[in-house]
Image: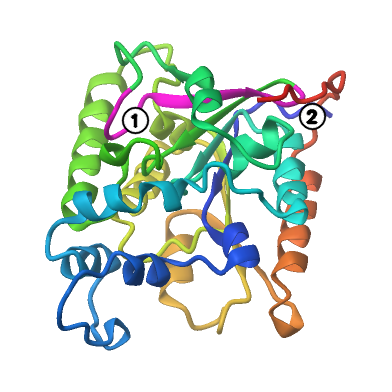
Amino acid sequence: MKNSKLQVLLLGNGINRAFNSDSWDMLLNSIDCRANKYDLGKFHCPETLKAVLVTEDNVDKALERKMNDLGNLGTKKPEKQLELLRRLLSIRFDHILTTNYSYELETAALGEDKINENALKRIQRHTSAARRCEASLMLHTYNRVEFDGERKIWHIHGEARKPDSMVLGHYYYGRLLGKMLEHDRRYSAVKPFKILSWTDAFILGDVYILGFGFGFAESDMWWLLNRKKRAGTGSTVFYELNPPDASNNAKLDLLRLMNAEVVPMTVENNNWTELYERAINDMEKRIIREPQTPKTPPNA
């Protein structure tokens, strides 16, 4: 039976971590420019404020220096990683939202093992809510690729080739949330409701969250999840991989209070590849759509 409702994937950094161990802490350590580098693990504050601390309130400059490393442009991706991403693309989500600055999804969709900036420029688009593709706070800008049909990939916290677009520190999260609120006030009363930003897709669609920890510092996403609940639109499925204790976890309780279905998955020996394969299997069973004629992904 065809699933006609809007289908949305929110993909975090989990699959990247499964193959190269990238994490928020590693990113913070890589941009740490302090003379006195005490252990951040013992400093209890949101990651968004840790970014301010380690860069001495120069988050934008620190990210610009690290731009090429964040994008991994020209770097080959492991075939198993690309295989998992192509399985996600094959599910035929209408919109794919990612918090990653890098371009694994575009690389997988284009049928390559690496990507370049010219290819990225060719696929960038914007909705009618913006006059042009945005250089910062990319609420209305996405990458359009062909993979068994059209796929819209939204870098909701920015992308590496545009340092001004990257959302990391506390100040930038506040700016993004302000823009989200402005968009919501301007367009939420317009009928029929159109998808003019990635926030619209999240609110209106059935959302599947994979590889995104939903940490308490993610103020924009917690607001958006609450906004979705109040709108009474679509469902939310959150895959919690290897939870430390799924029965005693404030984050999971909060997610359930906001009408998210929590799907805990565990395996022995932290076999992350198997965990992601199981989560993708579950999505494939939940999202059944009419088949399309397969297309070979175009080369970059």
Q: Position of residue 137 (x, y in %)?
A: 28, 35
Q: Position of residue 54 (x, y in %)?
A: 21, 70
Residue drawn 44% across the image and 53% down it? 69
The vertical placement of 210 against 46, above or below, is above
Where does the magenta region start and end?
Answer: 134-148
Q: Which mark is residue 250?
A: none
Q: In front here: 55 or 140? A: 55
Residue under pointer 1: 139
Residue at far left of view: 57
Residue under pointer 2: 289
Q: Could one spot residue 263 in this view of the protein? A: no
Image-based side of 129 in relation to 11, left or right: left
Q: Position of residue 128 (x, y in %)?
A: 37, 11
**Mark 1, mark 2: which one is toward the viewer?**
1
- In contact (CB < 8 Å): disc 1 and disc 2: no
Q: In front here: 255 or 195? A: 195
Marks 1 and 2, how far apart at CA: 28 Å
Quadrant hosting residue 180: top left
Name the secondary structure under disc 2: loop
